[in-house]
Amino acid sequence: MAKVVVFDSWNALYKQPFGAVNASATVDFRIDIALPYVAKVELKIHKDGMEEQSFEMTHEQGIAYIVSFKPYAATGLYFYYFKIQQNFDTEVRTTYYFNNRGMEGGEGFFTENYDDVCTYQLTCFEYADKAPEWYQNAVFYHIFVDRFFNADDHVRAPKPDSFIYARTEDTPYYIKNDKGEIVRWEFFGGNLDGIKQKLGYLKELGITGLYLSPIFEAKSNHKYDTSDYKKIDPMFGDETIFAALIQAANEHGMRIILDGVFNHVGEDSVYFNRNGHFDSVGAYQSVDSPYHHWFTFQNFPDQYDTWWGVSNLPVVNKRNADFQRLIYAGKDSVIDHWTSRGVAGWRLDVADELPDAFIGGIRQTLLKYPDRVLIGEVWEDATNKIAYNERRHYLEGGMLQGVMNYPFRQIIIDLLNGNLTAQQAVQKTMAIKENYPAEALAANLNNIGTHDTARILTMLSGNKAKLRLAVYLLMVLPGVPCVYYGDEAGLTGGADPDNRKFYPWGREDADISEFYRAAIKLRNTNEALRKGEYHPFSLGVLFGVVRHVDEDNWHVFIMNPTHQEQEIDLTKIYPQREDWIPIIQAAKIQKNKIAPYGFFFV
């Protein structure tokens, strides 16, 4: 049965251009209405935080109504729907066309009930904030430094009141007090020299970028409790060793990005110095400390703002000018200090906690150095994120170039575990594609596991066939793939600290290691997987991807996320997009069958 009202935000017939737009763009809308006695059709749209505006649509021949819209308040988010008025002899009827209830874009629904409102999102950015070419072409490897490789037969500069694991096979374990606080940290002894010694292995794996967990001096093994932003933790090495690592990595065709933890510091730090371990006068020690106003005390000295209630992580006031000078605004700032020494970019920890102006300040300093990248830790759709009651503008130009793409991770896991249909996976990935500026989508750091999540093999219940599909999806989806250390060796583990085991050198799962190598090679050797436009589709239970540069440079990937053999049937394609079908037909796959948890690539 034909629909009486049709709009599809993914289809160029109804909205052009697709997705996020530049502030100077004009967006052409069309809606088809096969209803009687239509008297008026309006595009109802409002800029985030502003009053709603109405734009009457012009009736073309047939059932089409059109309007051209130009963003009237520059960058940010606009939210829209359609209002339809019918004048009957005895009544005036008002109906609406809203976004679908998943707020995922594409086709919506037609209703007389205004209370059902689900608006479409239009992202408007200042300029195309493109990430460096080397970054877009990279495959990253995320190293939790203490857990990767120890270049020595001992642990360097061991911390007071800590313990060292007897064997690298030991499972990580915390010693906590009755308040749940960690009172004794534990270490395996991984260090920067260890990373340097394994660069040959990483190159053979196909890695071209390294993302290191924090390397600055700190009490913990994870180093998110910074003691001194200008000093490398002695357990890891020093500036000379780090310089040698950067040089060696460059010689192996790799670049290094660092984890910038600027929302909070450690209580045991130069800046706070609760335990008196540093020569400085810390904020905890005196109201006359030069650092005192960096922190918010409710009752000096023992009650102060902490990150999510973690007592050893006092939160810094990012609006404090002295702190800004330390991090990015002053001479030899932290960003300057390390970037000038060859660091290729930064990943900002808990970007939600950093004000937009603070992120913008970091980016402005980073712009002094060519070919650097700035990405942020955001777990949700970063285009419409609200944090602390403020809409964030990370990706509208001049701040982050991309974010960690946790939504893609969840889609991959849910699809493979049967919690999401192939059609739903299409809708959810298209929602991200539609909301994000194209340059940001290409620069998102995609992952299927990090130090904050359970291991991917554990999430897939140890099923290697599912894991293989997850890895290939990581390599064919748009964005920059990032492998969490040890996933390629078959490490398992649930929540922290179980997901931070030592790399199993000499005990790797050969099958898993091989399909990681093959998947990474596929991406590294096919330009369309790195730069091509992204078009997802489903064929019944099968999930597919077209990556398309031009008519001579494209690839099709189709996977079977089920335990039964499936036949490819083009009549089941969703969505029905004529411009994709010739590409799929050209791949000559119409009659192919795909084995359980198998895939087709051409």
Image (spheres, grey):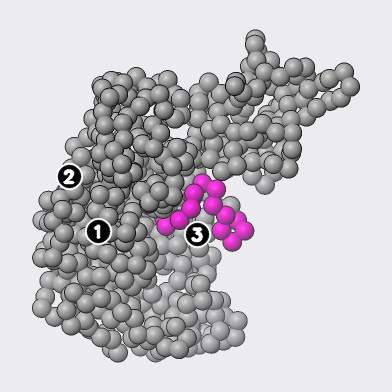
**Label 1 to label 2, Cα distance in Å?**
14 Å
Identify the element where label 2 is drawn.
helix
**Placement of 530 over or under 231, stated as above or below:** above
Residue drawn at point x = 69 percent, y = 21 percent:
57
Furthest residue in direction top, as rendered: 61
**Label 3 to label 1, Cα distance in Å?**
27 Å
Amino acid at circle 3: Asp
| Mark 3 or mark 1: whose residue is earlier in sequence | 3
**Placement of 375 over or under 75, stated as above or below:** below
**Label 2 to label 3, Cα distance in Å?**
36 Å
Q: Main secondary structure of the magenta part?
A: loop
Residue 314, x across and y down, in percent = 48, 77
Q: Which residue is mark 3?
A: 352
Dots 2, 3 in contact, CB < 8 A: no
Identify the element where label 3 is drawn.
helix
Q: Which residue is mark 1?
A: 487
| Quarter containing the C terminus | top left
Amino acid at circle 1: Asp
The segment highlighted magenta reads 373-390
Label 3: few (<14), some (14–19) or many (≥20) C-alpha neighbours in 10 Å: many
